[in-house]
Amino acid sequence: MSRLDGKVCAIVGAGQQGGATIGNGRATAIRFAQEGARLVLVDRDGDALEQTRADVLDAGAEVVLVTADVRGASTPGDVVGAAIDAFGRLDVLQNNVGIGAGDQPPHRLDEDVFDRIVEVNLKATWRLCKSAVPIMREQRGGVITNVSSIASIAGTQIAAYRMSKAGVDALTRNLAVTNAKYGIRCNAVLPGLIDTPIGVDAAATALGVDRDDYAARRAAQVPMGHQGTAWDVANASLFLASDEAAFISGVCLPVDGAQTARIG
Ligand SMILES: NC(=O)c1ccc[n+]([C@@H]2O[C@H](COP(=O)([O-])OP(=O)(O)OC[C@H]3O[C@@H](n4cnc5c(N)ncnc54)[C@H](O)[C@@H]3O)[C@@H](O)[C@H]2O)c1
């Protein structure tokens, strides 16, 4: 018996941009597939989604794709609808989409950048949860895992990303409490410095610095002395999605090599 045997799992943000490593969404899709999940994979990038489909088919999963922007008016309904049409239920919703481009400290932050980051990271996550909850209540069970960030609780120069992810943590706890009696669990994973294409390649390019130098700078900030990988985020998400976490809800779990445990 695998850890997600037959469970229908929607992973939103299951593609990834090119880079030297694997991203959190694709790694989570592959780990869920290896543990027997049936998958609904969602991303705005159709080509990236096709690559993830190939990876999860290799792992033996049944899969349907939804190519959509999380900001779209019909996207939350389309995601839940795709799960019901293909598999008749929705057991797990993993909200992985997160952006931060253009972010600044509060006094320099543009209003349109604030709006874009909050809309994608927080509002879209809430809308997807809102869409999933009724079917999970009807089923008398389900799991929602929101990918937040340690930026939601730890010091950082950037404002909108931090505010949006703090909102995701608050949403997570609220969902956990308001849906506990329906058998729905809701938790957040808070990645620290993870070696993903967006976390490292895209950031290094935006800053105009060498990728390896930037990766080394990030690693030096972590008490464990190295960045995490997308597999660390995927494995934490797998645990939270599985029945092994049956009594765990409302938790915001850092996956950060002890970074948030360090003061000073
Ligand atoms: N990489 C890190 O160091 C790090 C640290 C803390 C938190 N996180 C969080 O982890 C999550 C995943 O990050 P990652 O770096 O692994 O990226 P990833 O490789 O998982 O890619 C995210 C995917 O989201 C998709 N996406 C972006 N905007 C979208 C939209 N509007 N609609 C639909 N799809 C959209 C992208 O096309 C991409 O395929 C994010 O929520 C991020 O905030 C990452």
Image (cartoon, rainbow, N blue to C red):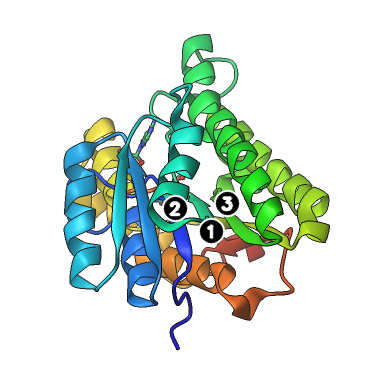
Left or right of 42 in this view: 262: right
Report the residue marked by disc 2: 10
Report if residue 226 is visible in the image: no
Task: Quote the CA–CA distance across marks 1 and 3.
Answer: 23 Å
Task: Quote the CA–CA distance across marks 2 and 3.
Answer: 23 Å
**Foreground residue, 93 or 174?**
93
- Disc 2, disc 1: CB below 8 Å? yes
Residue shown at 53% from the left, 59% from the top: 92
**Foreground residue, 163 or 108?**
163
Residue shown at 48% from the left, 29% from the top: 120
Report if residue 118 is visible in the image: yes
The numbered disc on residue 150 is 3
Q: Residue furthest top?
A: 111
Report the residue marked by disc 1: 92
Three-letter residue code for mark 1: Val
Three-letter residue code for mark 3: Ile
